């Protein structure tokens, strides 16, 4: 039943994935890590050994790979006998890595939607532009492809499914709220790859409301949410991956995504964007060279992985779900609180990487056990949320609920 | 007596220089303009013809030249029979162009201190690092070299000399204040080459006080000056070229430079600087390419010359001079007010380019007439200010004075 895993990427999230695969290598099998820079893979391998994270003796190895090279990826999948690929490399790689999996019959799991260089914020639903075009092929070939199995997208999609299955007859509103109340102590930094992070916020903001796509500008609509543990937090309506699948899978409910931003972040973002420094389109320098400004901003900002040692504070991410049950209106908040320092102590990464990296390992474990080995393409809300949330309860990301009956942990065992 | 002029550079300031040379080509002779991009020279030539700016028939031509190539510059000086070089190209060129002039016995005039790529804010006095090292050679060869003959440095140095000669027995304080109260209507733009502009403010702030160099941080010391025409204006102690020569030439008086900045400018500057985007040191991109962030910021910002058509409002630049006369303390403010729209209407450039571009032409005219043809290296305050300010009075930059006796124009004819 154990299945060998190939991890694509060697950033902060990949580090978490590797540690969690190691901690669960009685369910998963060999662990191979591949990135353009093998030294980064080797550093992760060393970190896993340093924490004695391998639950039982097993393979753990790093490999140099340009994952844009589909044939090279297929060769590595074959040479390592990998049966599940967890793709946590840059989102520009998704369709190349998925192609390698479809060609080799390997299960594929990612945590973020595909991005194409030079394009930002394409026609909604975003999944329709790339991933879903491969759905028929995945079904025909019987290859399991699980899209967006990080925290958001990922766990928040499972929360929405849980609400729909267990708490409502009809869901009318899903408001996903992501608050990072942590502090990294730097003047400015992004918690993910700056290139991907900023691309999320430079385009139009899509939300699904009243049965159609609504558009707003970034930071146009703000709202203060009073959340467990982290307290009152200002959040803004943003575009985000999960809105683009939940819009289809929540029986017509409104779906919005809200992310917390401090005034300082907004100011820096506004300055950079207004000047054109967040553009993915190249500019011509005085000497004639062409450079993409966003790539220069990325080079100037701290490496997100480097934030981990000094990161303190907590994140709170969850779904406010409204609807009706037994003829009565109700509202629940299903959520998780994670701690940056705890994450660092356990796996050497900060909390944002932790919340993104643990869930795809839980998904891989469910593919290994067969519960999520669905032999087709699926977004997380299309799968049974309970076994997934159960694994997360035992792997550092416990689910809680707050509603009219109070604030309590949820048990799925 | 007429002397042929070679203008190095084809930006906004060069455009002003060309127009003013043309308007005074009864005193100056042939006008040649050289820049890496000949099309920019040709556009300036066309602009001069469009305004019918040539006072009398004469040569006006553009040339392609990489002025870092000393031999090419010497060849162009010789082939055009140029006797005066007005260098208003990038400040990185100064020492190369000066070398070409010293080798060919050609008078040299510039408007800003030499800059070396990769170095910012070197040991004071800045002129001692490059220009003054050539002073002996200029004197031995009998070549006239006039340093910093723009507005600031330049006219403000002449104001200081005028104060010292005519208004004081002893000067104790020279506070140069530069306020641009104009509006260009863009989110953010610099009035000069952004690369040079930001380099002025990213290093330590040097001022000359109590007979020694004082250091402060940028925006550490602010002060509101209530100025003629533009009104109360917040200015900050900055490093600037003229402090580095006036410190030597004002008999020990304190010399400070203050520049006006709005809160928006300071915010944008602070964000860019804090992130490292104003650095002149290259950063390595993810693909391994090395790029200087400041050059990318420059590429994203509006071309300063492009601001001219929409620029409105006025500048006020002058010297608050304190000291004693006939045993009594006194204070004078010697200044000029210029108008962006007037500048555009006359020469097609904005006011900042205008104030920088007219004075070196006045200096060239004085070299042509012999009054400033001193056959050695000099900063402006070492030369007689009256004929210089007289020419400026008749060329769009009139000098005024405000003191206990009121606010009035000064006549030097």
Image (spheres, coloured by chain):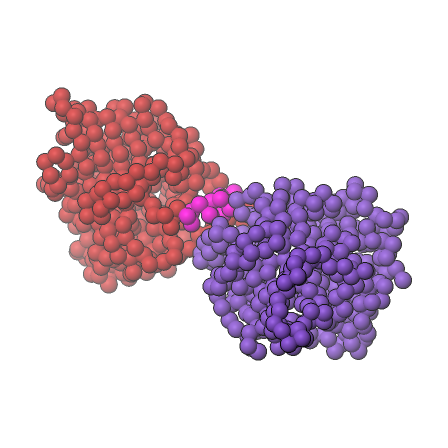
Chain colours: A purple, B red
Q: Which residue is more in the foreground, B130 or A324?
A: A324
**Residue B96, image x, y percentages:** 40, 40
Q: How many tags in the picture?
A: 0
Is A371 placed left or right of B296 in the picture? right
Is A64 placed left or right of A211 in the picture? right
**Residue B402, image x, y percentages:** 15, 38
In the displayed structure, would residue B157 be above or below residue B26? above
Is B339 placed left or right of A117 in the picture? left
> For residue A48, what is the image quadrant?
top right
Quarter of the image with the N terminus of chain A is bottom right
Q: Residue at x 56, y 49 (%)?
A: A189
Quarter of the image with the C terminus of chain A is bottom right
Q: Residue at x 42, y 30 (%)?
A: B123
Q: Residue B275: within the magenta?
A: yes
**Residue A399, image x, y percentages:** 71, 58
In the displayed structure, would residue B84 be above or below residue B183? above
**Residue B241, image x, y percentages:** 34, 36
Q: Residue A326: within the magenta?
A: no
Q: Which residue is more in the foreground, A245 or A227?
A: A227
> For residue A317, what is the image quadrant?
bottom right
Q: Residue at x 26, y 26 (%)?
A: B253
Q: Which residues are magenta?
A: B267-282
> For residue A310, what is the image quadrant?
top right
Question: In this view of the protein, can residue A222 be seen by the observer?
Answer: yes
Question: In this view of the protein, can residue A33 be seen by the observer?
Answer: no
């Amino acid at each position: 039943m154990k299945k060998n895993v190939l991890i694509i990427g060697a950033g902060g999230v990949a580090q978490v994935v590797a540690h969690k695969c190691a901690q669960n290598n009685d369910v998963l099998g060999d662990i191979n890590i591949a990135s353009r820079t093998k030294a980064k893979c080797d550093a992760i391998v060393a970190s896993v050994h340093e924490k004695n994270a391998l639950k039982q003796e097993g393979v753990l190895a790093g490999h140099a790979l340009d994952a844009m090279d589909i044939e090279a990826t297929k060769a590595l999948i074959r040479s390592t006998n990998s049966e599940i690929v967890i793709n946590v490399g840059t989102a520009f790689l998704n369709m190349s890595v998925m192609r390698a999996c479809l060609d080799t019959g390997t299960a594929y799991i990612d945590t973020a939607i595909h991005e194409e260089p030079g394009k930002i914020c394409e026609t909604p639903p975003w999944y329709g532009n790339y991933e879903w075009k491969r759905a028929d092929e995945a079904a025909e070939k019987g290859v399991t492809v699980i899209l967006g199995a990080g925290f958001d997208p990922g766990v928040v999609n499972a929360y929405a499914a849980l609400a729909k299955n267990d708490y409502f007859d009809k869901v009318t509103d899903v408001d996903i709220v992501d608050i990072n109340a942590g502090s990294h102590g730097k003047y400015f930094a992004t918690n993910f790859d700056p290139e991907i992070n900023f691309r999320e916020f430079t385009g139009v903001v899509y939300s699904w409301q009243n049965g159609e796509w609504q558009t707003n500008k970034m930071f146009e609509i703000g709202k203060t949410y009073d959340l467990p543990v982290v307290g009152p937090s200002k959040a803004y309506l943003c575009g985000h991956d999960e809105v683009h699948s939940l819009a289809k899978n929540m029986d017509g409910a409104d779906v919005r995504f809200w992310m917390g931003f401090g005034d300082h972040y907004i100011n820096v973002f506004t300055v950079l964007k207004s000047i054109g420094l967040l553009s993915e389109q190249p500019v011509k320098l005085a000497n004639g060279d062409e450079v993409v400004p966003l790539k220069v901003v990325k080079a100037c900002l701290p490496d997100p992985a480097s934030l981990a040692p000094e990161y303190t504070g907590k994140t709170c991410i969850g779904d406010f779900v409204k609807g009706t049950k037994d003829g009565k209106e109700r509202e629940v908040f299903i959520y998780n609180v994670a701690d940056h320092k705890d994450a660092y102590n356990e796996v050497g990464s900060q909390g944002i990487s932790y919340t993104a990296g643990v869930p795809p390992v839980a998904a891989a474990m469910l593919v290994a056990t067969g519960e999520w080995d669905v032999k087709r393409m699926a977004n997380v809300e299309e799968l049974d949320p309970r076994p997934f949330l159960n694994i997360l309860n035992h792997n550092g990301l416990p689910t809680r609920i707050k509603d009219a009956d109070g604030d309590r942990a949820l048990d799925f065992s």
